Amino acid sequence: MTTPEISARLVELCASGDFDTALKELYAEDAISIEPQATPEFAKETKGLDALIKKGEKFTHLTEELHNVTVSNPLVTGNIIAFVLTMDITMKGKKRMSIGELCVYQVKDGKIISEQFFM
């Protein structure tokens, strides 16, 4: 897949909240995920597709309800994809909140090799 094709598919899957399919379909085996900072729930960096899938499962387990997800139109330049993702979410044991983040992805050989989130 080309970077624009990956971008379109990634936006489609993220907008529907299907993050697991995005990982399994679009990510390289050695992909890395970088959070703004380490938290008690998540490390600053997660390496490898299996670890990213487990991170996604943990996020799902910590989620009481995902009310809505919106994704901006993506920006694509060369092998980089960026968009704003906003989640209206209730985490277990917490109040409903809106989380917005800038998501930046790097593509190589038709797969996402890195994702980084900025809040």
Image: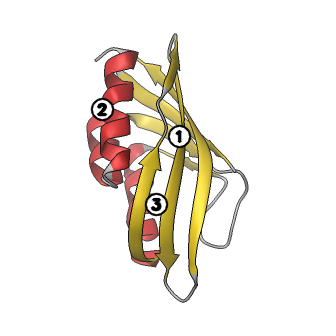
Q: In which quarter of the image is the N terminus?
A: top left
Q: Of helix, strand and loop, which one carries label 1?
A: strand
Frontmost residue, 55 versus 86: 86
Instruction: Tell me if I can see residue 109 in this picture.
Output: no
Which residue carries the number 3 mark? 55
**Few, some or many C-alpha atoms within 10 Å of disc 3 (few <14, some 14-19, many ≥20)?**
some
Structural distance between the alpha carbons of marks 2 and 1: 19 Å
Percent position (x, y) of residue 12?
Answer: 31, 39
At label 2, which amino acid type do we have? Answer: Arg
Q: Of helix, strand and loop, which one carries label 2?
A: helix
Label disc, if present, on residue 9 of the rendered structure: 2
Mark closest to the chain's N terminus, 3 or 1? 1
Foreground disc of the pair 2, 1: 2
Question: Horizontally, is 13 left or right of 62 in the view?
Answer: left
Quarter of the figure with residue 64: bottom left
Q: Residue at x 67, y 54 (%)?
A: 44
Structural distance between the alpha carbons of marks 3 and 1: 11 Å
Q: Of helix, strand and loop, which one carries label 3?
A: helix
Percent position (x, y) of residue 96?
Answer: 54, 78
**Vertical arrangement, residue 33 with respect to residue 78, above or below:** below
**Vertical arrangement, residue 12 with respect to residue 55, above or below:** above
Which residue carries the number 1 mark? 32
Q: Residue extending furthest bottom?
A: 93
**Vertical arrangement, residue 78 with respect to residue 51, above or below:** above
Query: Mark 2 touching mark 1, by CB under 8 A?
Result: no
Percent position (x, y) of residue 87?
Answer: 50, 59
Q: Residue at x 58, y 65 (%)?
A: 98
Structural distance between the alpha carbons of marks 2 and 3: 21 Å
